[in-house]
């Protein structure tokens, strides 16, 4: 609030770290490491998940597996 | 009966506009919001449980109506409005915010918040798809003004534009699809569109295109990973009350759109794209949780938590399983309560020290034991511990996903580990250890008035966790069954 209340002792190092973390996307570049990460996390892993999500063998049909309920 | 829920916010805004005194403004806003809440309970009591699957209380020539699902979401909005109004008063009253009188600032903020509440209720009750679009977009403008005028830093301009344009771009896709549906059917009435949905399904590619257009819009609103950038910026720069409304209510519009429009109107396209949506949900859960682990801003941690939880809710929604959809709706309501509490807690500490940086806070339990207790309770509720409403919703959503595809559910279940990890990290970082050296002076603990904001949230979070049948009653279940 304007003008009153307790204040934090702002640390320039913490503020700099905070600003760097907030603006990290401004410093992104495609180098060998980041390209590997992007390919792994944005391409390979989603494809792996899609393969599992669309695979018919993973789609459970409990009634067929379990059989008819006991009378 | 139902239209009263739309009239009361309008009357509230008009009355507040002509008032001058801060306390009177607050009292009027509070009275109207409590009247809306009482009217919601009144509607619940009068709700015909024998025909619960049908839309009831049709008014204004059938333009508005409510079923079990909408009723609980409207309850969530009306339950949170008094809390948001009181949180605004706590932050604004007696303080020069924009260089003018505090009562003017209070008036402006309250009118904007009540306006958002009005559009939120409209989204959940309108029966015309074009009105739905207008209501969906209507909440953007007051939120834009809240962020750009009452945000805390210079970045608020960027954040407000990002929020507005991002959501608007998605809504453009929705508008084009709606116009296509309107031209095809000659009407925007939801019931008629439902009856005619087979004619849409006759042309597969046409249904797919419409589904994609709807999905782009709602996935931006949810948001899912990939479309989530606006949420982080908006949450960080928005004032506490706007963050509460954004997380607890506005995000539910995306899920509601999927639930009410995408899935019922385009069933074959939903089935076709189901694996794709499940993959995106899992990515939302995993990536948001991992990203939250490395954040220094408390609000960004909770914003990432919201993204992950919306992923879990959408996972249950697209599980094609009754339990999954039940869990998804339960999770939406639970998330509304818990995220509201978490943002309010961040607001409590921000009001005192004007920083959300985790690195500045440590050992707060020594000076603020009650605040840390509340933070512990709601952090654990956010982590879906048993006896919290989050547990019921998450369990059912994952169970529904397991019933559809165990591979998907097993990977999504990693959220059970990841979400507590970043919540505990946040809790532990700021609460325990040696007291921080960055706080030379310490205020009193959380005040009685601030605790009052959390009591209803605490009550419903754990009441719904212990007695979920309160929600899974004759009002909600038939509507889900019909879906």
Image (cartoon, rainbow, N blue to C red):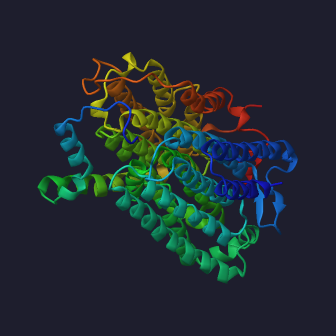
In this rendered view, identify the residue nearer to me: B404 or B99.
B99
Residue at image position (48%, 49%) is A57
How many labels sit on residues?
Answer: 0
Residue extending farthest left: A32
Tell me residue B163's x, y (percent).
43, 61
Front-most of residues B10 and B131: B10
**Quarter of the view holding residue B349:** top left
- Residue B135 x %, y %: 63, 64
The N terminus of chain B sits in image quarter: bottom right
- Residue placed most toward the observer, B32 or B298: B32
Residue B125: name its quadrant.
bottom right
Q: Is residue B359 depicted above or below B169 in this figure? A: above
Residue B178 visible in rendering:
yes
Q: In this view, does A38 lie to the left or right of B135?
A: left
Q: Which residue is drawn at 34% across and 51% down?
A: B153
Tell me where residue B278 appears, x and y as whole percent: 47, 53
Q: Left or right: where does residue B223 sit relative to residue B389?
A: left
Which x, y percent locates residue B75?
69, 45
The residue that appears at 40% across and 57% down in the rendered structure is B230
Q: Quadrant of the C terminus of chain B?
A: bottom right
Q: Is residue B323 among what the camera can see?
A: no
């Amino acid at each position: 609030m304007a003008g009153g209340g307790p204040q934090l002792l702002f640390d320039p190092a913490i503020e700099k770290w905070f600003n760097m973390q907030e603006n990290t996307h401004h410093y992104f570049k495609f180098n060998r490491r980041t390209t590997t990460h992007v390919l792994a996390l944005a391409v390979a892993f989603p494809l792996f998940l899609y393969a599992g999500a669309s695979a018919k063998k993973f789609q459970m049909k409990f009634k067929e597996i379990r059989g008819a309920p006991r009378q | 009966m139902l239209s009263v829920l739309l009239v009361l916010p309008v009357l509230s805004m008009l009355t507040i506009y002509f008032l001058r005194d801060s306390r009177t403004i607050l009292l009027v806003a509070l009275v109207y919001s409590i009247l809306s809440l009482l009217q919601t309970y009144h509607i619940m009591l009068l709700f015909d449980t024998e025909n619960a699957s049908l839309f009831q209380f049709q008014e204004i020539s059938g333009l508005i109506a409510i079923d079990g699902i909408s009723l609980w979401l409207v309850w969530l909005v009306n339950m949170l409005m008094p809390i948001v109004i009181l949180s605004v008063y706590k932050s604004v009253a007696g303080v020069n915010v924009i260089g003018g009188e505090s009562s003017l600032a209070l008036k402006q903020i309250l009118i904007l918040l009540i306006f958002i509440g009005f559009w939120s209720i409209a989204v959940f009750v309108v029966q015309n798809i074009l009105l739905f679009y207008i209501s969906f977009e209507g909440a953007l403008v007051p939120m834009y003004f809240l962020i750009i005028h009452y945000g805390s830093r210079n970045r608020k301009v960027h954040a407000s534009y990002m929020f507005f344009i991002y959501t608007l771009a998605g809504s453009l896709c929705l508008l084009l699809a709606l116009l296509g549906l309107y031209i095809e059917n000659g009407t925007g009435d939801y019931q008629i569109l439902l009856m005619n949905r087979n004619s849409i399904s006759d042309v597969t590619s046409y249904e797919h295109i419409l589904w994609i257009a709807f999905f782009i819009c709602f996935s931006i609103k949810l948001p899912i990973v990939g479309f989530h950038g606006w949420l982080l910026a908006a949450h960080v720069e928005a004032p506490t009350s706007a963050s509460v409304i954004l997380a607890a209510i506005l995000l539910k519009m995306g899920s509601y759109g999927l639930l009410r429009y995408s899935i019922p109107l385009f069933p074959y396209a939903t089935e076709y794209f189901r694996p794709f949506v499940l993959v995106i949900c899992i990515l939302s859960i995993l990536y948001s949780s991992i990203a939250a682990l490395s954040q220094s801003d408390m609000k960004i941690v909770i914003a990432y938590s919201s993204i992950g939880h919306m992923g879990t809710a959408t996972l249950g929604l697209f599980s094609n399983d009754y339990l999954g959809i039940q869990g998804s709706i339960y999770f939406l309501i639970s998330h509304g309560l818990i995220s509201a509490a978490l943002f309010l807690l961040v607001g409590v500490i921000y009001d005192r020290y004007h920083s959300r940086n985790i690195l500045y806070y440590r050992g707060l339990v020594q000076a603020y034991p009650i605040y840390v207790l509340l933070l512990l309770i709601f952090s654990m509720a956010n982590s879906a511990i048993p006896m919290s409403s989050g547990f019921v919703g998450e369990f059912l959503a994952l169970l529904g996903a397991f019933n559809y595809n165990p591979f998907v559910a097993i990977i999504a279940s990693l959220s059970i580990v990841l979400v507590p990890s970043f919540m505990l990290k946040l809790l532990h970082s700021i609460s325990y250890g040696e007291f921080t050296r960055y706080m030379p002076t310490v205020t009193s603990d959380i005040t009685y008035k601030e605790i009052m904001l959390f009591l209803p949230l605490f009550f419903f979070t754990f009441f719904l966790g212990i007695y979920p049948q309160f929600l899974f009653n004759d009002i909600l279940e038939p509507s889900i069954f019909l879906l």
